[in-house]
Image (cartoon, rainbow, N blue to C red):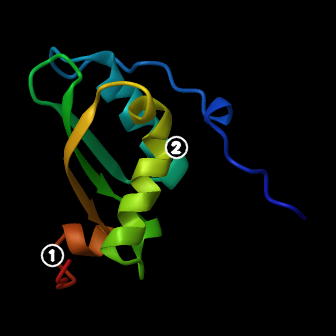
Amino acid sequence: MAMASWSPSSVRCSPLPPKRLRHPVASVMECKIREKLGADNVVVKDAYGDGEYLSISVVASVFQGKSKIDRQKMVYKAVWDEVKYQEHVIEQIRMETPEEASGLEQTHL
């Protein structure tokens, strides 16, 4: 059985109700990361409310056994449509497994 390939059109994300005053791209990115990676927790912070400078924090089981570079590639792939043609700067990405996030596993990422 062949797996369906993921494409931007296969993810149906509409902006979620805002957690605070911020650019809608942050909500769309959160939704896409959550759906694509099956993430337990996703937070995209918009530094100035204009959607230009963003930081991303993701907790996902799919990161288990992956290097920091591979984890980063997975996150960028999930939000590529939002960053490839628009001026969104991802200043920081924090990527952890649930065990790492709860402090049960020591990492040197």
Q: Nearer the viewer, residue 104 or 83?
A: 83
- Give the quarter of the image for residue 48: top left
- Spot the residue most to the left: 48
Q: Is residue 4 above or below residue 21?
A: below
The residue type indicated by label 2 comes to Glu
Q: Could you say which quadrant of the image residue 61 lies in? A: bottom left
Please give the name of the residue rendered at 43% of the width and 60% of the height, measured from the top-left corner: 73
Q: Amino acid at mark 1?
A: Gly
In percent of width and height, residue 74 lies at: 46, 58
Q: Looking at the picture, how far across and down is residue 11, in whole percent? A: 61, 34
Question: Considering only vertical position in the picture, is 29 above or below 101?
Answer: above
Q: Residues within 10 Å of mark 1 (few under 14, many from 20)?
A: few
Count of numbered marks: 2
The x, y position of residue 90, in whole percent, is 24, 42
Residue drawn at (20%, 81%), measured in percent from left and top?
104
Q: Position of residue 66 (x, y in %)?
A: 41, 77
Q: Quadrant of the N terminus?
A: bottom right
Return the residue at label 2. Answer: 35
- Between residue 39 and residue 87, name the one nearer to us: 87
Q: Which residue is tagged 1?
A: 103
